[in-house]
Image (cartoon, helix red, strand yellow):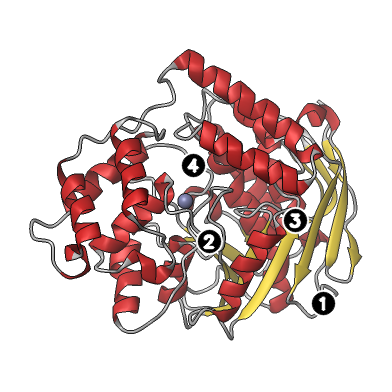
Amino acid sequence: MRPIVLGKPVVDGLRVTIPIDPGSATRWFRQNVFRVQYSGLESLDPVDDAILVVPALGTVLTLAYACGVPVQVERVDGAYAVTAQKLADTFGRLYPHFLSRGFELRGERVGTPGPDPERSDPALLLYSGGADSTSSLIEHSDDVRALLTVWGADVHSADKALWERLLRTVRTGELTAGRRLVVARSNLQDLIDGPALSRYHAHGFDSASWWGAVQHGLALTSLAVPVAVALGLPRVLIASSDMAGTPVPWGSMPIIEDEVRWSGGRAENDQPELSRTEKITRVIAPYLHDGGRLALAVCYQPSRGPSGLNCGRCEKCVQTTTQLLLGGVDPREVGMPTSPQTFAVAKKALTRGEWHGDDSHRTIWRSLQADVPPTLTGVCAIPLFRDYLEWLRHAKIVISSDGAEPLTRLMIKNAQYLGGRLLPWLPFRFRKRCTQLAVRLTRGY
Ligand SMILES: [Zn+2]
């Protein structure tokens, strides 16, 4: 196997580019240069090449584990190199069909691993504006010295309008304004062919994508490492995902991010002991009941709404709306659109199996139904919400598995794959319209 070769990082102000020779993994690469443009830092001068290469490594390592391809760099931080090797075993256990035994990281090791930081040491928090990272920010408000928001993760790197809406919300939000905000704009999702990998590994990930099931935790924490070093912060926090206690493998878990180390610090998967419902009802709701104000950005749909950050109609939005109501919070106060129409869409989708997901989705909906109190008071007594919650309490929820309607599903997956390959070649305005149309046509898939 010819290795994936990462060239020497080229630094131009706060922009880092790393040329890549994909070696034997050529078929999975869409571009041959890794790029990240940071803003909100004074300088990257104090950051060694051995650290600057870490974001590119975090993006290609999971691909190298899957293909069993070595990765070669000139110099790499010694502690991060140990991480890379350990995670080959971790991903090999999570996804037994990965060829991770063939993985090897070649290159000079630099730096001296230090002791792990204390739990109260200053931290950098990966912040998306969603419920999970908001809960982390409330809990670690005193320790978090800077926020890192990534353009190219939840928001596509070409969607300037949505990105500016999100950034405006972060800059003006009561919880976030006045904090140091670092932005990283990167091609971490465009560099490798996520749609092709999702399709190739479809049986291994159930209904998830390569980005969700494999790539995002290691890629995002690795993107944060040069920022933590530049700011002298020994901890990087990434909010945990809620897998509802099921054994479904996911691309962000304590066994992944807690292993990410560099000489001088480590990453932490934050609040893994709390479910998403608990983060909303036990952390976010009390903050709001105490007079705090928030705008949440939880939605991943390209058609999030004409001016807001959430569509209000997708499974993620409706789940969040339900969790907020159970916490006694009016969802409209945090930017969740709710109306008779949004609940009508939800009732139809939830009972007809139009939303697909793995066991964690089914478990979460079952526990939300069980959490609806016998007597609805406060915000839950508002007629719009009361009607929905009374319906939810006894509804027969159907979250379809990926195996439902196999022929239709296969055709739609193939169409999505072809669309994903063709769309990047189209002008963004046209691409966005096509994506919105595809979401409407394939709603539930
Ligand atoms: Zn949504």
Check disc 4 and give the amino acid type. Trp
Check disc 3 and give the amino acid type. Ser
Give above or below for 301 relative to 296: above
Give above or below for 270 relative to 416: below
- Would you say 139 lies left or right of 407 here? left
Residue 280, position as x, y percentages in the image = 34, 64
- Would you say 375 lies left or right of 443 here? left
Residue 355, position as x, y percentages in the image = 40, 35
Residue reaching furthest to the top: 407
Q: Which residue is mark 2?
A: 309
Residue 94, position as x, y percentages in the image = 50, 35
Residue reaching furthest to the front: 340
Classed neighbour count for the residue bearing mark 3: other residues with Cα under 10 Å, few (<14), some (14–19), many (≥20):
many
The image quarter containing residue 426 is top right
Classed neighbour count for the residue bearing mark 4: other residues with Cα under 10 Å, few (<14), some (14–19), many (≥20):
many
Check disc 1 and give the amino acid type. Ser
Label disc, if present, on residue 186 of the rendered structure: 3
Q: Which residue is mark 4?
A: 250
Spatial CA span between label 4 and label 3: 22 Å
Residue reaching furthest to the left: 374
Residue 238, position as x, y percentages in the image = 53, 61
- Would you say 271 lies left or right of 377 here? right
Disc 1 versus disc 2: nearer the observer: 2
Disc 2 versus disc 3: nearer the observer: 2
Give above or below for 49 relative to 61: below
Disc 4 versus disc 3: nearer the observer: 3
Spatial CA span between label 2 and label 3: 21 Å
